[in-house]
């Protein structure tokens, strides 16, 4: 991560984002006082849903429309566009950990406001995260098996006959 002095931003730009997050968090905390606490068993599905939503926003083509005003997407990676707050938002939309905090806030907020709707949304996103894990695992196993097969099929160095004395 580049320091603020090396980006076209000011500390105030990040303060605006922090203030928006803090205000949303404070509003959620205020609402949560009047609600049942989120059960511990919901934390794993919410975590998986947060992962899936963050990955969707930051990496998937379907969300290009959301990133396009703030992020330049190139073959060699992404780069925030513009200056000041626009650039800071571009950095946010390029970072799965950063968007993860916002995704978690939104999903927990939904869980607090409407538990039944939240369970459906969380289930869809958590199952998507599990599918992502399984696809990645399958790809990894296939790549390893293919590499082993290529090594086994590759012509090796010629073996010299052993000399007897």
Image (cartoon, rainbow, N blue to C red):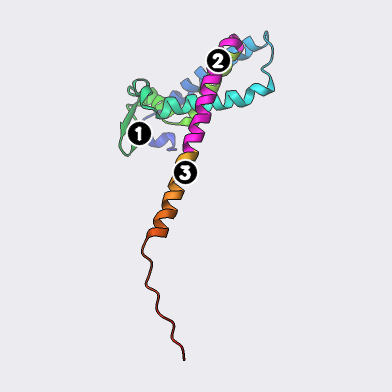
Give the Cα separation between the discs numbered 2 and 3: 30 Å
Residue 81 located left or right of residue 2: left
Camera sees residue 99 = no
Disc 3: which residue: 140
Which dot marks residue 134? none
Q: Say which of 99 and 40 sits in front.
A: 40
The N terminus: image quadrant:
top left
Of callouts 3 and 1, which one flags the residue occurring earlier in the amino acid sequence? 1
Give the Cα separation between the discs numbered 3 and 1: 25 Å
Residue occupying the point 51% across, 22% down: 125
Residue 75 location (% of width, % of height): 30, 37
The local secondary structure at tag 2 comes to helix
Give the Cα separation between the discs numbered 1 and 2: 32 Å
Of callouts 2 and 3, which one flags the residue occurring earlier in the amino acid sequence? 2
The local secondary structure at tag 3 comes to helix
* Label 1 Cα neighbours within 10 Å, binned few <14 / some 14-19 / many ≥20: some
Residue 53 location (% of width, % of height): 48, 24
Callouts 1 and 2 close, C-beta under 8 Å: no
Disc 2: which residue: 120
Residue span colored magenta:
112-136
């Amino acid at each position: 991560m580049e320091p603020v002095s090396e980006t076209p931003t000011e500390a105030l730009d990040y303060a605006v984002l922090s203030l928006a997050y803090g205000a949303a968090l404070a509003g959620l905390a205020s609402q949560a006082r009047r609600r049942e606490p989120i059960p511990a068993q919901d934390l794993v599905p919410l975590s998986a849903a947060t992962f899936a939503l963050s990955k969707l926003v930051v990496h998937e083509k379907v969300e290009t429309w959301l990133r396009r005003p703030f992020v330049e997407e190139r073959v060699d990676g992404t780069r925030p566009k513009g200056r000041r707050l626009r650039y800071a938002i571009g950095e946010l939309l390029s970072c799965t950990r950063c968007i993860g905090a916002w995704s978690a806030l939104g999903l927990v907020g939904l869980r607090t406001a409407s538990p039944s709707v939240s369970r459906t949304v969380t289930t869809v996103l958590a199952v998507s995260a599990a599918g992502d894990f399984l696809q990645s695992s399958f790809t990894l196993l296939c790549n390893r098996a293919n590499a082993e097969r290529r090594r086994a099929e590759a012509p090796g160095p010629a073996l010299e006959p052993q000399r007897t004395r």
